[in-house]
Image (cartoon, grey):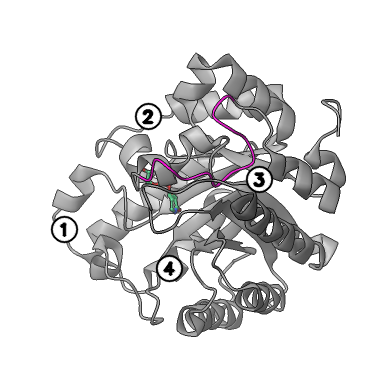
Amino acid sequence: IDSGEFLKQLVKYPLGASVNPRLLEENANYRALAGMEFTSVTAENHMKMALIHPEANRFDFAKGDEIVAFAKKNKSRVHGHTLVWHNQTAPWMKEFQGDQQAWENLLKQHIQTIVKHYQGQIAGWDVVNEAFFDDGSLRPSIWSDHIPDYLAKSFIWAHEADPKALLFYNDYGQDGKPKKMEAILNMVQDFKKRQIPIHGLGLQMHISIQSKNEEIKQVIEQSTATGLNIHFSEVDVAVNPKNNPDFIYDAFAQKAQSDKFLLLFTSFATIPAAQQYGITFWNVGDKDSWLRGYFKRPKEYPLLFDEAYQRKPVYVELYEGL
Ligand code: XIL
């Protein structure tokens, strides 16, 4: 593979990464790589409640707009993440007092203001993120506490605001968690029956070299069988999930990792083309991976690009394996 050949050229669907506007501004290597290797972008954090809606009567679109402008310059697609989540809510939301109607107004206004702001610029939205526990029960949150049927309502409100945007339910760790998967599939069936608009399933795919291939494939098959668009929305393959301080990223670990990347890409290829929304990596290079930052695992190497934003051997192995 030479520098004029790209993974994105081997696939017919958008290939994306989550991006961080600070790195886009400050790091020329990051910016160049993100623009060159990817055809889709997701905001890692800046379209989440806490950042985009910091006060009841104030939205802050500046950083989200920067990401959209970056995408436009690179002719990339933008995926919206995320309208409703139990995490990274704004502090004022947690303190909000009101009856059911007041809560519904709050969430509806949140969703519709953002979706309208980005109307025509964002192809699809993660409308609700991570609403189910592993046992399939509904995860309690300020939304489930105050708004009955908040999942369906969120999708209806988003659809009203931009009828052309594709609406996704996004979640993690469905592999090996049949109850969680079942809850998601039941939600899809229920939405179809009630004619609640939903167009896609986001499978985050935060996996590791220990993830079981059969379990991953089963989740992909079950998701595809819904007929909805499928997005591998936050891909990374952890090589040191137990955070071993003496971990060495040797040839053995790299091979195990490239096998998992290959599994994801070859499985995605089995999805009917009309349902292939894309594959998005969670972060660009190992250095900016949330597994290092958020989970404080300094010896983690879950992505295709190294600390200097150069292609790693796993990039080449994936490219050559496809
Ligand atoms: C993560 C970001 O990468 C971190 O920077 C932030 O501190 C926490 O959230 N599932 C999701 C993403 O849907 O929004 C999360 O992103 C990672 C897990």
Earlier in the chain: of badge 3 and badge 4, it is: 3
Q: Is residue 234 left or right of residue 290?
A: right
Q: Quadrant of residue 221?
A: bottom right
Write the start and end of the magenta stretch as one range. Answer: 297-308
* Label 3 residue near ligand 1, CB within 8 Å: no
Q: CA distance from mark 4 to mark 1?
A: 19 Å
Q: Nearer the viewer, mark 3 or mark 1?
A: 3
Q: Residue at x 16, y 58 (%)?
A: 98
Question: Callout 3: few (<14), some (14-19), or many (20+) C-alpha neighbours within 10 Å?
Answer: some
Q: Residue at x 47, y 34 (%)?
A: 288
* Kind of residue sitting beneath label 3: Ala
Q: CA distance from mark 2 to mark 1?
A: 24 Å
Earlier in the chain: of badge 3 and badge 2, it is: 2
How many numbered marks, from 0 up?
4
Marker disc for residue 123 = 3
Pointer 1: what residue? 98
**Residue 119 appears in view:** no
Earlier in the chain: of badge 2 and badge 1, it is: 2
Marker disc for residue 151 = 4
Q: Is residue 148 magenta?
A: no
Magenta span main SS: loop
* Kind of residue sitting beneath label 2: Asp
Q: Are marks 3 and 2 in contact (CB under 8 Å)?
A: no
Earlier in the chain: of badge 4 and badge 1, it is: 1
Pointer 2: what residue? 60
Q: Residue at x 49, y 64 (%)?
A: 171
Q: CA distance from mark 2 to mark 4?
A: 24 Å
Question: Callout 1: few (<14), some (14-19), or many (20+) C-alpha neighbours within 10 Å?
Answer: few
* Kind of residue sitting beneath label 1: Gly
* Kind of residue sitting beneath label 4: Leu
Q: Nearer the viewer, residue 105 or 118?
A: 118
- Mark 3 lies on a secondary structure that is loop
